């Protein structure tokens, strides 16, 4: 298992980032997960669409909420088998910080870090943050 602690920062999002993490159902996340592993998916035959579970959000401090996340990419040896951790959003009205902490099981540690960072960057971009 590899420990991860990643943050991506964006300025002036056009969408309230808290609305995204609290949205139910959580189907919005699946496309971001697919895009985050697109390089690995091209090199492997995907067994199925990624499976994930995004828990309910909860306040974790001033201007911050978090939710548990579990993600199985289903790409065999081309990516980690599972990521289990927490997705955190901090927002002060101008700057949004998305953080992902947790453990990946399997795969190359460096490639896993790139994939998890890509996921956060994709979400920040979708929020309209620069």
Image (cartoon, rainbow, N blue to C red):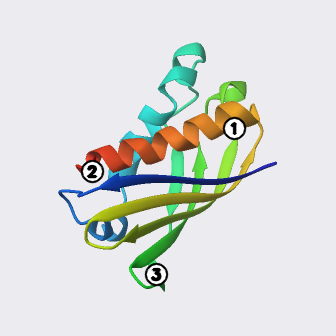
Outermost residue to the top: 43
Q: Position of residue 31 (x, y in %)?
A: 37, 40
Q: Is residue 50 left or right of residue 3?
A: left
Whether residue 51 is situated above or below residue 65 in the rendered picture: above
Of the two numbered discs 1 and 3 on the same chain, state the one appearing first in sequence.
3
Q: Residue at x 62, y 29 (%)?
A: 75
Q: Position of residue 128 (x, y in %)?
A: 22, 49
Which is nearer the eye, 60 or 85?
A: 60
Q: Secondary structure at mark 3?
A: strand
Q: Is residue 114 left or right of residue 62?
A: right
**What is the CA distance from the residue labelled 2 to the residue labelled 1?**
28 Å
Residue that carries the numbered disc 2 in the rendered image:
129
Which is nearer the eye, 28 or 60?
A: 60
| Res 50 visible | no
**Dot 3 crowding, Cα within 10 Å, few <14, some 14–19, many 20+:** some
**Dot 2 crowding, Cα within 10 Å, few <14, some 14–19, many 20+:** some
Q: Secondary structure at mark 2?
A: loop
Q: Secondary structure at mark 1?
A: loop
Q: Are circles 2 and 1 on residues that touch, CB within 8 Å? A: no
**What is the CA distance from the residue labelled 1 to the residue labelled 3?**
27 Å
Q: Residue at x 52, y 21 (%)?
A: 39
């Amino acid at each position: 298992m590899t420990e991860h602690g990643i943050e991506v920062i964006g300025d002036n999002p056009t969408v309230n980032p808290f609305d995204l993490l609290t949205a139910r159902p959580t189907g919005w996340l699946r496309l971001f997960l697919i895009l985050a592993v697109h390089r690995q998916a091209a090199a492997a035959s995907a067994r199925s669409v990624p499976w994930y579970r995004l828990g309910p959000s909860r306040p974790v401090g001033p201007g911050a909420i978090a939710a548990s996340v579990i993600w199985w990419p289903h790409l065999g040896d081309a990516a980690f088998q599972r990521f289990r951790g927490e997705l955190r959003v901090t927002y002060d009205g101008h700057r949004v910080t998305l953080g992902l902490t947790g453990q990946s099981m399997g795969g190359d540690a460096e490639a896993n870090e790139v994939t998890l960072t890509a996921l956060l960057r994709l979400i920040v971009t979708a929020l309209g943050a620069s």
